[in-house]
Image (spheres, helix red, strand yellow):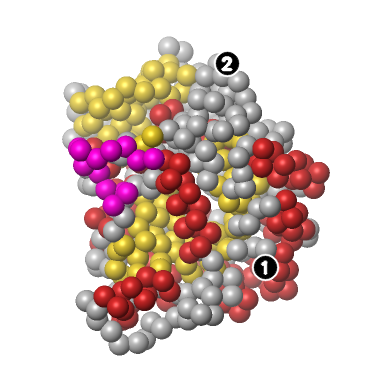
Amino acid sequence: MAMSSMVSEIPVEGCVICRTQSICPVCLNRLEAKRVEYEDGVYLEKHCREHGFFRTILWRGRPDYGSWRREKLPNHPRHPFTQVERGCPYDCGLCAEHRQEPCCVLLEVTSRCDLGCPVCFASSGEKDATDVPLSTISLWYERMLKAGGPFNIQLSGGEPCVRDDLAQIIAMGKKAGFSYFQLNTNGLRIARERDYLASLKEAGLGVVYLQFDGTTDDIYRTIRGREILDAKKKVILNCRALELGVVLVPTVVPGVNDKDLGNIVRFALENYPVVRGIHFQPISYFGRFPDQPRNEDRITIPEILRNLQEQTEGLVKTEDFHPKGSENSYCSFHCTYILMPGGKLLAVKNQAGKTCGCREPEDSSKALLRTRSFVARNWIYPTPSAPCSCGESASMGEWDVILERSKTHLFSVSGMAFQDAWNLDLDLLQDCCINVAADDGKLIPFCAYNLTNTLGEGLYRL
C-alpha cells in the first residue's frame, strides 16, 4: 500500500523549484525527487515503485525559500577513505564526491544512557548497550588526523557521562593534537557530581553542549520522560563555578515546546556569560520514534525564526539570521549578537551570509575555518580579562562601546535541521560538515549515519 506524508489541503498544482535525489523511507533505495512550492510551503516529493508516493514539508513561510539560497564552492575531502561505487548515500566514509570537509566530528563513546527519551537519534540505552573501547577511540583520533584534522570534537553517545574514563578520552585526544572538545550531554551526572565535571575541564573540555528543551518540567516529561529542569539549572551553576561555557541545545517539537523558544532565549541571557548561546534543532524522525511522522509533526527553519521574533517581542528578529557558510544553506541558521547594556541584542551583520543575484559563490573552505574558529573561541567561558559588564551605562549608538563589547559580550543563536528518511535531499547531504566516526574510523555525514527506515533499520549505525 502506498504511504504518504501528504496533507489533504495541498493544492493539486505546484511549482517545481528543482530536481534532486532522495531515498525511499521504507526500502532506503535511491529515488528521483523534486522540491515543489505550493501556497503553504515547499515540499520534497518522491515516488517509489514499490512503496508509493511521499510528500514532506521542507519550508513554511517567510523568509522566502529562494532568498535563503546561497551558492558555495565545494571543499572536497583531502584524503577520502572510500571509493565511489554505488553513489550517495551508500559510499560514505568520506568519499571523493562529498563536497565538504568536516567541521565537527562526533565520537559516540557509548550507547549506554541514563535516560530513555521517547525521541533519540541513537536509540540509546537499549538492553545490549556498550562502551566503545579506548583502542577504537585511539583509532578514531589517528584516522581523523589522516583525513585532514584536527577537527572540533564532540563527545556524544548515548550519554557520554556514564563513562568514568571520559577525562582519559579527552586527554588522549589532546595528546594526539586535538584542541577543542565539547560534551553533548543530558547533564544528569554533571549536575550531581561537580568533581567529575572538574576532571573533564582539567583534561581539556571546552564547553558543555547541554540538552535543554524548555523552561518548564511538563516539556521534559513529554520529550524526555522525566522532570529534569532542576538538574539542567544545577549544571549551569556547576559550570559557572568551574568557569565552563554552556550552549543550550533544544530539540524543537511542534505542540510541545515551540511556544517556549522566547523563554529559552530569556533564560539563556539571564545566565550569561556562562551560557554562550543556543543551538536549536527541529525534531527529525530517525532513531527512536513511535510512528510515521505527519507534516504537522514537523517544524521548519522559517517557523522557528518567526517564533523567536514573536516570542522575544523583537529582541531577536527574523532578518538577523542567515545561513552558515560551512554547510548547505537550507540546513541551518545563525546569528551572532553583541549583548549590549540593558540586555539589548545587537546583530553582527555577516556579509558572508547575505545573498543577492550578483554575489560570487562562497569559498566553503574559508567558511569552514571560520565556523571551527568561532565555535572554539566563542563557546568557551570568557577569560578573566573580559568580565561581564552588563550593568554599565552606555548607548547602543556609541561605537566605542560596541567595539569593546564585540570582544567580550558575544552571544550566538543558531540551529540545524537534520534530515531523516522522509525529507533527505542528497544535495544537502553532500554538503554536510558534521560527521560521526564509525567503528572502523570512517567519517559518516551525521544524517546518513543516523538514517533509519520505517522499521528502524539504517545504512551505517549498527
Secondary element type, mark 2: loop
The magenta stretch is 351-363
Residue depicted at x 55% and y 16%: 86
In magenta segment, residue 355: yes
Which residue matches tag 2? 85
Question: Where 361 falls versus 388 (above or below)?
Answer: above
Examine the rendering and report whether any part of residue 128 can be seen: no
| Residue type at numbered disc 1 | Lys
Mark sitting earlier along the chain (1/2):
2
For the residues labelled 1 and 2, the Cα–Cα distance comes to: 43 Å
Taking the image as shown, residue 13 lies to the left or right of residue 129, namely left
Of the 4 image quadrants, the one containing the N terminus is top left
Numbered circle sitting on residue 182: none
Q: Position of residue 388 (x, y in %)?
A: 44, 80
Residue depicted at x 35% and y 58%: 335
Q: Closer to the camera, 165 or 311?
A: 165
Question: Where 252 falls versus 343 (above or below)?
Answer: above
Q: Closer to the camera, 433 or 13?
A: 433
Disc 2 packing (10 Å; few <14; some 14–19; many ≥20) = few
Q: Main secondary structure of the magenta part?
A: loop
Of the 4 image quadrants, the one containing the C terminus is top right
In magenta segment, residue 304: no
Q: Position of residue 17 (x, y in %)?
A: 25, 27
| Residue type at numbered disc 2 | Glu
Q: Position of residue 212 (x, y in %)?
A: 50, 61
Q: Position of residue 284 (x, y in %)?
A: 46, 42
Numbered circle sitting on residue 201: 1
Residue depicted at x 22% and y 76%: 397
Say which quarter of the image contains residue 172.
bottom right
